[in-house]
């Protein structure tokens, strides 16, 4: 059975339009995502927001998060 987790991770972002000067913003964006882990390898974890019954698993809204971006994983009781 897939584990339900809360993943805290740092996301990249872009600037809007032109940046003036020599000091562009250099910050990541903290994100919290919750879902069931449906796949994992040495580089990434895939979570899904929606899943069907266990006998015929179907998933919707799967998202891959690079492990290098993850700061914390907390198991959630389901």
Image (tube, grey):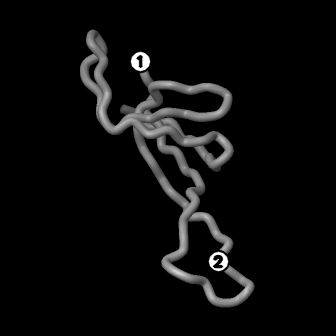
**Residue 36, quarter of picture:** top left
Instruction: Quickly name the residue at label 2.
Output: 25
Other-residue count near label 2 (Cα within 10 Å), few / some / many at <14 / 14–19 / ≥20: few
Camera-side residue: 63 or 19? 19
Camera-side residue: 8 or 61? 61
Q: Is residue 1 above or below residue 16?
A: above
Instruction: Quickly name the residue at label 1.
Output: 1
Q: Nearer the viewer, mark 1 or mark 2?
A: 2
Q: Quadrant of the C terminus?
A: top left
Q: How far across and down, in percent of the image, does residue 41 sit?
A: 62, 25
Q: How far across and down, in percent of the image, does residue 7 sit?
A: 52, 45
Q: Which residue lies at the image location 57% right of the left edge and 51% below the top edge?
A: 9
Other-residue count near label 1 (Cα within 10 Å), few / some / many at <14 / 14–19 / ≥20: few
**Residue 23, quarter of picture:** bottom right
Q: Secondary structure at mark 1?
A: loop
Q: Which residue lies at the image location 54% right of the left edge and 64% below the top edge?
A: 13
Left or right of 52: which side holds 20?
right
Q: Which residue lies at the image location 63% right of the left edge and 49% below the top edge?
A: 69
- In the rendered image, the residue lying farthest to the right is 22
Q: Is residue 14 above or below residue 49?
A: below
Q: Is residue 17 above or below residue 51?
A: below
Left or right of 14: which side holds 25?
right
Q: Which residue lies at the image location 44% right of the left edge and 35% below the top edge?
A: 47
Q: Are the residues flagged by discs 1 and 2 in contact, CB closer than 8 Å?
A: no
Q: Give the mark nearest the N terminus, 1 or 2.
A: 1
Q: Secondary structure at mark 2?
A: loop
Q: How far across and down, in percent of the image, does residue 21 sit?
A: 69, 89
Residue 21 has which mark?
A: none
- In the rendered image, the residue lying farthest to the front is 18
**Residue 45, quarter of picture:** top right
Looking at the rendered structure, the number of numbered marks drawn on it comes to: 2
Calculate the distance from the C-alpha at mark 1 to the C-alpha at mark 2: 42 Å
């Amino acid at each position: 059975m897939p584990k339900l987790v809360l993943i805290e991770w740092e996301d990249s972002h872009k600037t809007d339009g032109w940046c003036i000067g020599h000091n562009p913003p250099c910050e990541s964006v903290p994100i919290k995502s919750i879902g069931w882990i449906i796949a994992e390898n040495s580089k990434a974890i895939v979570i899904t927001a929606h899943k069907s019954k266990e006998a015929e698993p179907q998933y919707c809204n799967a998202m891959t998060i690079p492990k290098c971006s993850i700061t914390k994983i907390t198991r959630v009781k389901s």
